[in-house]
Amino acid sequence: MPKVIFHRAGGATDVVDVDAGSNVMRAAVQNGVDGIVGECGGQAMCATCHVYVREPHLDALPAISEDEEEMLECTAAPRDERRSRLGCQLTLGAGGLEEVEVDVPATQI
Amino acid sequence: MCPRPRSERVVVIGAGHAGVQVADALRAGGHDGPISLVGDEPVLPYQRPPLSKEHLAPGGTPAPLPLRAERFFTDRRIDLRTGVTATALDRASRTVLLQDGAALPYDVLVLATGAANRMPAVPGADLAGIHALRTLADAQALRAGLSRARSVLVVGAGFVGLEVAAAARAHGSAVTVLEAADRPLARALSREAACHVAEVHRRTGTDLRLGEAVAAFTGRRGRVTGAVSGAGSEYRADLVLVGTGVVPRTALAAAAGLPVADGIVVDEGLRTPDPAIYAVGDCASHPSVHTGTRIRLESVQNATDQGRHVAAVILGDARPYTEVPWFWSHQGALKLQIAGVRLPDDENVLCGDPATGRFSVCCFRDGRLVAVESLNRPADHMAARRLLAAGRSPEPGQLRDPAFCLKEFDREQAVA
């Protein structure tokens, strides 16, 4: 089963198993991982599911779409040019990532 | 205004985007008293936007996306009551009566009752196979229906109707859309943008019938088989989706003697004339600094921003509500985004070439930018949100330069 590891701003870590086809935002919201909001429901419209992906997983990420690119310029916590992504755009399993480890920013709004 | 004591009892009626946000923001803001959140649907509060999009797409995700995990409510001591309708407000004793017999006393009451679908009052409207879309239960029934339907008739070319039309085409169904106005999205969009939307749907094979209202639904053995339009044309369909707008759910407020005029009437602090009662989201009519008129918006942004704002007001913040409204709709490959509020007499100036399928319509009032409708141009949309929030505006004439770029303009202005 695909897995997401969330390192929260306060230092705690959540390891969440997810269904194939789900994404990092959905995994966080369904499991009550604090610090990820997903206000628009995963439509790349709000930048409240911003995460910093950890280095070993960066090469496996899907390309950044035009929508996501625009939202990444408006994140509440500073954008990291290499590591910042929207969780709703990171699909797990089903040909996507099998595992991903992310840092949750201190603020989303 | 003095801050209220943080131990007051708050009751929120409605557990949609607005209601959940109120409860969340109150706790996050330090409110320590009891919070009850009452929702009439028998499920954990969920995200509505995906219901007309991914949820309906072939191979889409049928599981609802919760607004918050169940433990969010327990961890924060939010008394979430689902599947319960509020039946009456007793303002004198500050009590809400619930259908299950409970009486909830409050010091502060927030009405976040949302809106209900408006169904056309025509013969046959109660036939099986006629769907509307608002709740998760609606979406589940529609999803099941779409997977079997060979021909789909959509009544009303609003956002929901067009999103469902796009989903039905993706399922391979023949799709007809009946719209009484002379263009789709007539209430929400400029003529320039609306005409492009019409073209996009027609190009994907949707039969868009403008200037035709439904006069009656036809059926056999209690099940819909089609519809007859006001012009007398007959359309056959094995599934009908009605998307002819909503009415705000104001009955509770009206019965309690609160003023209602296309929504529960609130002031710039989202408060009703009863100082203990507020209203937010789809059900509320608020004075807008963006139009200078009262408006009632039906959007997630409005619900969440008003939810956050009312929580701040309850905690003692006296600033008026001024957030820039924004909205989006995904219809197949078309991504439509709106920032600001357009009025019918605004001057519309194109930015970009509609023939490319990527352009924006910039709406000016008295020479100032008030709204931007972007079609597959997300950069324009985000720039518009920033410009409108900062009160910055290009001159309408600047847009006639083909090299003009809203995002560049925003950057230059932000630096200047």
Image (cartoon, rainbow, N blue to C red):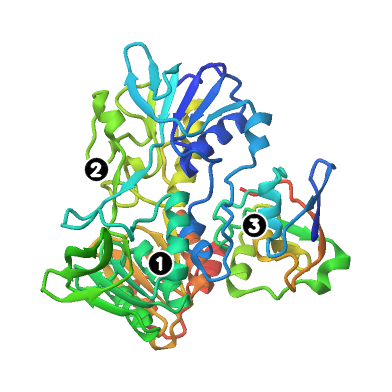
Quadrant showing the N terminus of chain B: top left
Graded by Cα atoms within 10 Å as few (under 14), some (14 to 19) or many (20 or more), the crowding at tag 3 reads many
B125 and B269: which is toward the camera: B125
Q: Which mark is residue B25?
A: none
Residue ID at (48%, 57%): B51
Residue ID at (70%, 50%): A28
Graded by Cα atoms within 10 Å as few (under 14), some (14 to 19) or many (20 or more), the crowding at tag 2 reads some
Residue ranking furthest to the front: B221
Residue ID at (56%, 55%): A41
Residue at the disc numbered 1 = B164
Closest to the camera, between mark 2 and mark 1, is 1
Protein chain holding label 3: A
Q: Where B97 sits versus B176, above or below? A: above
Question: With B180 as the anchor, is B177 left or right in this view?
Answer: right
Question: With B151 as the anchor, is B335 left or right in this view?
Answer: right
Closest to the camera, between mark 3 and mark 2, is 2
Is residue B107 visible to the viewer in this orientation of the structure? Answer: yes
SS class, disc 3 = loop
Residue ID at (42%, 72%): B168
Protein chain holding label 2: B
Q: Which mark is residue B262?
A: 2
Residue at the disc numbered 3 = A75
